[in-house]
Amino acid sequence: MIEGRKPNYYIGIKVAAKTGQKAAYSKNKAFDKQYYLDLIIKAIGEHKALNRNDIDELLWNKLPDWMDGKQKKIKVNNLLSELRRKNKIVNKGTDTQSKWVLVGSNNEKIN
């Protein structure tokens, strides 16, 4: 009947289908984490570098509606951290002026 984690419950897929709320269900249901990771990698590859605002803009409306702004920021932080730990991307900017690039681009070292 319902899905989600406390306190962010939303209607389940069967209820959504029967009540004509399919779009609302999809807005609340998050994509798989790999979708977000792939999206970041693809966008950086296309543009050679993205700053944090670019990445926020890319993902913001794709994250589930039940998340507030703070939760979305944390989610994006976690996604970037995961890609960085896996040596997929590196920040060639600073903490306040990030510039995320793919590892291996412009002779970037792989640790």
Image: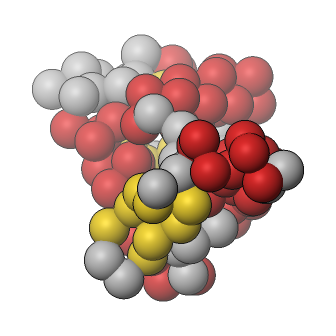
Front residue of 40/89: it is 40
75 in relation to 90, above or below: below
Residue 62, percent from left and from top: 68, 50
The residue located at (72%, 41%) in the rendering is: 17
The residue located at (45%, 71%) in the rendering is: 9
Whether residue 7 sits left or right of residue 92 in the image: it is left
Q: Quadrant of residue 77?
A: bottom left
Residue 95, percent from left and from top: 41, 71
Residue 76, percent from left and from top: 47, 58
Tell me if I can see residue 111 in this picture. Answer: yes
Q: Residue furthest front?
A: 18
Front residue of 83/11: it is 11
Front residue of 31/85: it is 31
2 in relation to 41, above or below: below
Tell me if I can see residue 72 in this picture. Answer: no
The residue located at (69%, 50%) in the rendering is: 16
Total numbered badges shown on the rendered structure: 0
17 in relation to 20, above or below: above
Q: Quadrant of residue 43?
A: top right
Residue 106, percent from left and from top: 52, 21
Whether residue 101 sits left or right of residue 3 in the image: it is right
Q: Residue furthest left?
A: 111
